[in-house]
Amino acid sequence: MHTAPSSTLTFTTEQQLDDGVLERRFTLGDAPGIPGILWTPPSATPSEPAPLVLLGQPGGLGMDRMYPRLADRARHTASAGIATVALEGPGSGERPPLPGADQARADLRRALAAGEPVTDDVVDRLVLPLVDHAVPEWRSALDALLALPEIDGPVGFSGGVIAVGVRLAVVEPRIVAAGLFAGSYVPRATFEEARRVTIPVHVLLQWDDEGNDRQAALDLFDAFGSTEKTLQANLGGHTGVPAFAGEDAGRFFERHLR
């Protein structure tokens, strides 16, 4: 398991957006640190601290590239009085690549180009190192963020690589609800972990997602041990998520975090 960074949080920039949301960039851990962005609603004060949602991201795209979508999700969530945070993923942005990740991606592209099935070995090499690095980093970030006077629990996890969200839902008791996006490859180990998930789960599935194994997504949803779990499936590809689906996910977190 990857060693977690220290829970030292250093804010580097601050700006107030036009809707009153406070956006602060920070680094987590010792220099050079892991970049992150925290958005807090105007209502978040030491006397009335806000709950928190962790904004997951697709692997490898980088936080700056994802910024418009992350900021839009953050501002929507802030309208419900909930703070959000994004953390640069392992191997993303300016962070060094994960060992073996380039070869795993090359093997994945080769299989897809040849019309061959993607083997469990390729999926494991592509996804499991990301999970092993990301989860301890998110837990250290939680230690630091929940120490801020304007942030408090409960905590939710939203989006990102679904295997990361599943692992966090199993090992992190401060997370009480998970809104997960189907559409990334799922290691076999993740199915076993899903059976241990007991918190409420909301899964968004794009039915025609060209990069998604639809059956694997359905099997993973079936594996979740939660007594409250919702699957929302919409027609369209990976980037065709309808606006109302995001609104439904927002209401899911309002119900469980407020």
Image: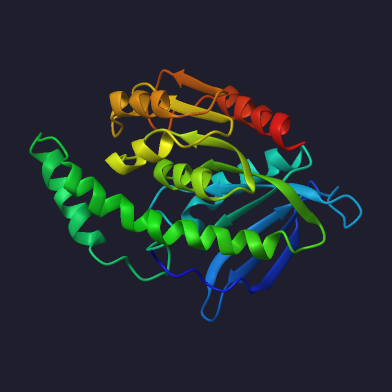
Would you identify the image quadrant in which residue 200 lies? Answer: top right
Please report the residue visible at 42 percent of the width from the left and 33 percent of the height from the top: 195
Task: Residue at 7%, 38% (x, y): give it.
Answer: 114
| Lateral position of residue 134 relative to residue 243, left or right | left
Give the answer, above or below, for where 96 lies relative to 114: below
- Nearer the observer, 193 or 51: 193
Give the answer, above or below, for where 253 lies relative to 24. above
Q: Where is residue 193 in the image (x, y as percent from the top left)?
A: 40, 40
Spot the residue most to the bottom.
31
Relative horizontal placement of residue 122, taking residue 34 as reference (left or right): left
The residue sitting at 22% across, 63% down in the picture is 100
Q: Where is residue 231 in the image (x, y as percent from the top left)?
A: 48, 21
Tell me the quarter of the image containing the C terminus.
top right
Regarding residue 187, the answer to whether it shows in the image is: no
Res 78 → quadrant: top right
State the residue at coordinates (32%, 58%): 129
Residue furthest toward the front?
196
